[in-house]
Amino acid sequence: MTKKSLIKSESLYRGLYNYMTSGSAIYEVMNNGSKGSDYIVKNFNRKSLEIEGKTLEEVLGKSLSDLRPNIDDYGLIPVMRKVWKTGEPAYFPVKMYQDDQFSGYYETYIFRIPTGEVVTIYNDVTKQKNTEQRLVESRSQLKALVDTIPDLIWLKNPDGVYFSCNPTFERFFGAKETAIVGNTDYDFVDKDLADSFRAHDRKAMGMNRPAINEEWLTFADDGYRGLFETIKTPMKTPEGSLVGVLGIARDITMRRKAEEALLENERRYKTTQRMGRVGNWEFDLNTGRFWGSTEAKRIYGFDPGVNHSTFDEIENCIPDRERVHQALWDLIERGKPYDLEFEIRPVSGPEKRIIRSIAEVIRDDTGMPIKVAGVVQDITQSKLADQKLRSSQEKFRILFESAREALYFSSMQGNIIEANQSFISLFGVKKEDLNTLRTKDLYANPDDRLKFTKDIEKNGFVKDYEVKLTDRYGNVMDCQISATVRRSLDGSINGYQGIIRDTTEMKQKELEKERLIADLQKALAEVKKLSGLLPLCMHCKKIRDDKGYWKQMEEYLAKHSEAQFSHSICRECAEKYYPQMDIYEE
């Protein structure tokens, strides 16, 4: 080969090397080739320089460790060393390399050239790998989505054999997907229902478009029965071949109930309108005239036979006309909500009324306002009721705060919601500390609160419930609680309300009274012991006791009195029974 041919060939290969789409590097191996620092860069092609973000001058003479600090941990060096030693090319599969500067997936081909240098050809497959990962994640997310959706989802082939299903469908059949796949409806439900399912499958395939039907389904796992809207869609390949039928069944039981409730509410609303005497009105912006329903005319005291009223006629009934007028124009010009309460002086009827008026603007196709439509309601009685309620609440507040007994409201959990001054004084707490006070902290014995809760929830109330309570200083008090449960609108218990009386002093007085009575009874008993007639034997002088036994006189008297005895003998008895003894001689 001529020198010219060699130059041309070298130029050709250099061009191929430099402009190949893969990165390539040529390394001279130093020492034993066991570390990245043993591989010295002899050449980099354009793609390698692009990947590294450096110029050829910046990499020549550098070691592989200089360019990739973590290369020794990457696993590539042992492969490169083996190629350098054996001369057999090798492939290093896709793996992520990461350091402070680089992070990506690379695949590398390694071979040795006749000069003994090692050549690597590598591709940055990060984008491809990330795409694959995103695809895997997407499939995983899709499966998670299908598994999470509360609808029943399944796929059958054209013959009705199941390909797959989600967990909700598993609940319907009462079997796992692995047991469902490969079987048909006839393996899990009765023939009539299976025939119905199959008929709808065929309908969807025959129509070549989604078919919708409603059906009642009963779940095998827990017996739940509901109304479901089922959509069955033929699935085809891009070439148009039928793959099977995709089924999705959604529980519409609650929706159906809501629809029925809506219809019932509409009926009730119409009845309420008629019975509540709520009027509606319209203000024509072009003519400046008001139209009102019969009830609206009645509220304003207008003649029901007159179809329209003027703007001035309406405003003349409104003492606060400036505010109402401004609110109407704010609605028309600025779109500000119109919802007002104001007093009117009807043309006829009562002297005054309080009404609530709500309105919105109606616009034409171009967006221009053409009229204002609204409703008007006579809320006079409601306002009077509110005033009475506020008055009642104020009276309650006065009674509540001035009561001598401790009054309280508490939650079921034992939080004090509200308490009066007597409660605060009784337990020695501060008003600002009531929100953090727990009723369990007031009981001297925690078991007493559990018993109180059990009794009041069982009976709905307790009366004069005796218990020992403690104040903030630890002083124990005898108390009586009379309380009732508080209920929510649904009837469930949500707290308690009650009166607490400190009976400590009363208890002490009762104990003193009982002691006094006992002392009196004892004294009285002592006084009565020897009163009345005593049965006395006329010969031996024995006394008969309450049980009918005859007792020696001294024994009886010693038992029933405080007398003590010492025995002696009288003169007559001494002379009679002991004449030989001169007991009474001088």
Image (cartoon, helix red, strand yellow):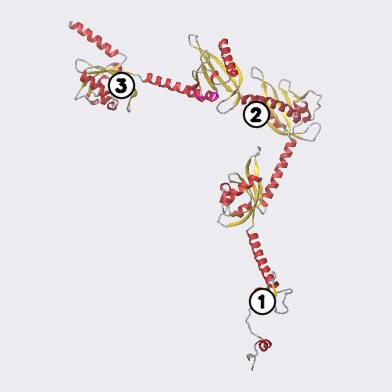
The residue drawn where x is 55% and y is 15% is 233
Amino acid type, residue under disc 2 in the picture: Pro
The amino acid at mark 3 is Glu
Give the x, y percent position of residue 391: 71, 44
Image quarter (top left, top right, bottom left or bottom right) of the C terminus: bottom right
Q: What residue is disc 3 on?
A: 52
In this picture, residue 382 sits left or right of residue 493: right
- Foreground mark, 1 or 3, reads 1
Select label 2 or label 3 by which is in front. 3
Where is residue 221? Give x, y as percent. Answer: 55, 27
| Residue in view at x 24 percent, y 24 percent | 63
Give residue 27's position: percent from left, percent from top: 23, 20
Q: Which residues make up the magenta segment?
A: 172-177
Q: Is residue 22 above or below residue 387?
A: above
Q: Tell me, for residue 552, which label it has, or none.
A: 1
Quadrant of the image occupied by residue 319: top right
Q: Is mark 2 on a helix, strand or loop?
A: loop
Say whether marks 1 and 3 touch (CB < 8 Å): no
Picture layout, residue 441 above or below residue 27: below
Res 195 → quadrant? top right
- Marks 1,2: beta carbons within 8 A: no
In the image, 134 versus 255, the foreground residue is 255
Relative to 104, is 267 on the left or the right?
right
User: Which residue matches tag 2?
Assistant: 337
The residue that appears at 68% across and 49% down in the rendered structure is 398
Q: Which of marks 1 and 2 is nearer the N terminus?
A: 2
Q: How far apart are marks 1 and 2 (CA)?
A: 110 Å
